Image: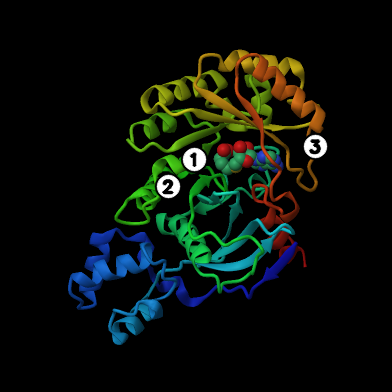
Amino acid sequence: MTTKTFITFPDASQAKRSLLDMDEQQLADFLAELGEPKFRARQTWEWIYKRYAGDFAAMSNLPKALRARLAEVATVAPLTLATEVVSADRDTVKCLFQLHDGQTIEAVLMLYDQRRTLCISSQAGCAMGCTFCATAQGGLARNLTPGEIVAQVLYFARYLADPALPPDTDVERPAQVTNIVLMGMGEPLHNYANVWTALRRITDNDAFGLGARHITLSTVGLAPMIDRMADEGLQIGLAVSLHAPNDELRTSLVPVNKGYPVDEVLAAVRRYVAKTNRRVTFEYALMRGINDTPELAEEMAAKLQGILCHVNLIPLNPIPDSPFQPTSDEDTERFAQILRAAGIPATVRLRRGIEINAGCGQLRRAVVGKAKAS
Ligand code: SAH
């Protein structure tokens, strides 16, 4: 594994306007304020979303004076790389980014056979308080803006498109992001409006243009927001972090279960499937002696009967100072078999990126936590 830590700021871009937080009309208005004609908005837009320009200097069909002026007052890269970790097999790249106010967020690029899957964050920190999750431990700092969410995608689009960018890997360098999962830091449905503005920008053919079906949003299960999502008319995949089939156990692991108990979440999921026709994924982090017994597998299978779904079993990524340990491979397979035998498709997710702290919130904890302690 290779770790590179770059100089961190807080930098002066705080006062700069992020063009990624603007739609095309807002961008045109902004450029009009600078005395520019309307067509400059289209040119700038295409540099950002079609050519992944990371700075104004690259925007070669804009007048030099305008590029210099924009660089003074605006930014197209509202996040800066703070730490980059590449796995030993070089097919997972994890980045810790710093935002203009010093907050840090994580994003991970995973190079599968033909897929280039990006895992991005929706909030700096998280308010949900799941007891086994590293992000939860720091609480919520703030919501990410739409531009900060989109910026993570553009960063990796640029990374994949530009073979000169570090680090070199042995993996054949794919040209584009093919899949995105909102499974990084934060609860996407707790930052609903900004996340959906970002998702529209990511899926809009006129902007980034990735098909909605290639995107999955993972939620702790905020039931009313799942309904809202079903009404958006975009075929975004839904993943729900269940982790337990009954309220008593689930509340002890996922405290928001108090407000949105299992049956309510599952009812919202059924409505989502009915509206979108998409198979829903249930995530289940297996913790030794906590939620991994055969009885719980049976209970889980019974609960999910009749739902067009798939269960993703993930042996827990252990986090420091936590009492929770991963279930053994044997017990994980047993749990999966029980689900399958009851007709519920189940797969065991690879523990990808575990050596590079690619579990939720773990890199930030390792880097920022260390900095704080020293
Ligand atoms: N807030 C959203 C998305 C972020 S977390 C959600 O709850 O779904 C993405 C997934 O990682 C969730 O299923 C979450 O429960 C899981 N997760 C968090 N910490 C983990 C850990 N230590 N090991 C395994 N999975 C973990």
Whether residues under marks 1 and 2 lie with C-beta atoms below 8 angstroms apart, the answer is yes
Q: Looking at the image, is mark 1 or mark 2 earlier in the sequence?
A: 2
Residue 239 lies, with reference to residue 275, above or below; the image says: below
* Mark 1, residue position: 217
Residue 220 lies, with reference to residue 136, above or below; the image says: above
Q: Secondary structure at mark 2?
A: helix
Image quarter hosting the N terminus: bottom right
**Which amino acid type corresponds to the residue marked 1 in the rendered image?**
Leu
Q: Nearer the viewer, mark 1 or mark 2?
A: 1
Asked if residue 142 lies left or right of residue 255, the reply is left
Nearest to the observer: residue 51 or residue 44 = 51
Q: Measuring 57% from the left and 27% from the top, which residue is drawn there?
A: 310
* Mark 2, residue position: 195
Q: Secondary structure at mark 1?
A: strand
Q: Which mark is on residue 170? A: none
Q: Quadrant of residue 31?
A: bottom left
Q: Which mark is on residue 325? A: 3
Residue 99 lies, with reference to residue 72, above or below; the image says: above
Q: Looking at the image, is mark 3 or mark 2 earlier in the sequence?
A: 2
| Alpha carbon distance from label 1 to label 2 | 10 Å
Q: Measuring 60% from the left and 23% from the top, which residue is drawn there?
A: 345
